[in-house]
Image: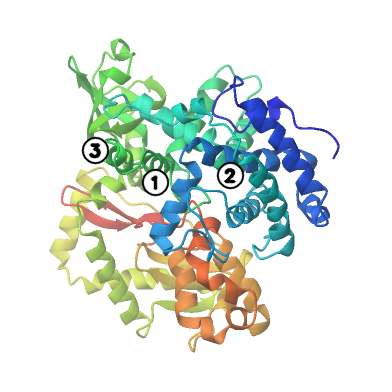
Amino acid sequence: MEKRIYIKDWLELKPYKKQTETDSYYLKICNVIKRAITTNRQSFVLQKYLNKKYIDYLACFLTSYLEDIISETNIWNSFVKKHQLLYKKQLPFYILDEYYEKEINPQDISFLIWYFLNTVQEDIFILPFNDFIVETAEKVMEVFDNAWEYAPENEYLQSVYQISENEADYYVARNLIDTILFKTYLFYPDTILKLQEQELEIIEDGKDNEDIMMFLNENRDSTLHKTHTRLLSLKGKEWSSEILGNNHQLHKDFLSIPPRIRGFFLYKGQDNNSIFIEHIASSKKFNLTKKSFDQSDTLKEVDTILYMGIAQWKDEWWFSGVFFQQPFNPDLILDEKNSLESRMVVNFIDHQKKETDKLLEMQLTAFKDFNNGLPIAFMPSQEIDNYVKNYTEYFNNSLGLSPKEKEEAKQRAKNDGFFGTEEDPKNYSEVSETGLVFFNPKSGVEIALAVNSAFPLPNNPFFSVEESEDDIMLLLISDEMSTELAMFCIDNCKSDLPFFNEGIGKRYLDDIDFLLRFWKKDTYFTKPSITYTGQDKLPTGGKGLL
């Protein structure tokens, strides 16, 4: 642990590559922090969870927090502000009787150590109440207190997080999101390390591929649009909006960026300003601004197939990501028309306009009627497929459609190129002998395995109190199980579960929503599993559920 931290390590957590005037000062602080966290009586615990490299980066990470507060870059304060808005307190876990916003606090440091430890490694969940975290934070706070009066502002760092109020260029806006997600200290243990891991894998798999840069760029663009942070399960566009602040003209523009669309399109022509394209799977039409696309002269024949990514900024669609073209191919067209996965890429457009919530309410009512008034059913895993199939038939019959109306609905879908999809039955028994079917009011039918002992309910013959703690933790942590299912357990079962009454789970309850966002970062916000087909939009359940 004698090795000092060098400027190269410090710059790993900076949104710039060349050293600024203030970096030497903060690098000195960084090395003092390293000594403080590796020479106190609790340091052996820290070294148990982190290797030498990550201990160096933890010192850089904590020092970057000090630099952030001094320089007023609004990174940490944006998190505190958002947490306050959501939960009426500045931070989870810790006592906040003496807490000073926009200043350094020992509670901040404790939280940052906890966050770093549980994000750079996922093998062990380290509790926020551990003595070694609090004691290490106290040592760090002593260093920061001594530096507080003299620490300089990093004015260049401030400039990196600024953008013109009238910025109309999507790529400039995207660059700010990229900087926040992939070049900012607060997200280093989360999105930055994850991106580095993905890029190493792409490089390893494509050593001899001349298109490797295209794959790297596409992965970065895709990750930038879809990934959520472990802190509050927010996307990069939401952090950008938060950091800029409510008074910035682009605050709402960042928030309103919809999901990026990547897939197959048909070329339909162009004029001086736009390229006209049609999403093959859904038949939706888009005008792509020529400001974003310098290959318009290569587009000659109508109905040429284009594979590309597009993103919207200020009501304009911009090229974003990968692009290639191929001649018209009827087989590919048919495959895309019948791919629910491809159709679901544009679900957000329909879900803004259609009465999706009303449809889900109808499905939930039918599910309860089908399941003795309950939204959850427990059964041997081998019976799940039949159960869902029978419920689907029950719901369709509950609509009361005449044979003629059913045929017309099918015909509308066929006219749109959709002939239905068949999925092979899943062997759920390979995962667990028993499972459950839950009707999620925000998405539809949900199947969960190996968590039955989290539900001590009268209709659950598979509950075992001895297995309940393991099942509850799986339910809470797994990103394959919805927030709504986890909260159904807490709202309806916590009084009968020792984990929430005697165990550590009791301490989780005060901050359970924060923890669910942390654990289920990319799936915390449940999306409707409904896709619309046909001109009059016959509702079809996504993921093969309905």
Q: Residue furthest top?
A: 297
- Which residue of the protein is positioned furthest toward the front in this rendering? 149
Tell me the quarter of the picture where residue 242 sits. top left
Of tags 1 and 2, the one toward the viewer is 2
Q: Residues within 10 Å of mark 1 (few under 14, many from 20)?
A: some
Mark with earlier residue (3, 2):
2
Q: Which of 407 and 211 lies nearest the eye of the viewer?
A: 211
Horizontal side of 471 relative to 404 (left or right) equals right
Q: Position of residue 154 (x, y in %)?
A: 53, 29
Tell which of 220 and 52 is nearer to you. 52
Colour logic? rainbow
Q: Is residue 260 above or below residue 438?
A: above
Residue type beneath disc 3: Ser
Residue identifier under label 3: 283
Q: Which mark is residue 341?
A: 1
Name the residue that disc number 2 marks.
Answer: 190
Label 3 vs label 1: CA separation? 14 Å
Residue type beneath disc 2: Asp
Give the residue displayed 30% in from the left and 21% down from the top.
304
The answer to whether residue 320 is seen in the rendering is yes
At 45% across and 41% down in the image, what residue appears?
74
Q: Residues within 10 Å of mark 3 (few under 14, many from 20)?
A: some
What percent of the width, then of the height, locates residue 322?
Answer: 43, 25
Residue at 65% across / 52% down in the picture? 113
- Residue 157's label in the rendered image is none
Disc 1 is placed on an element classified as helix
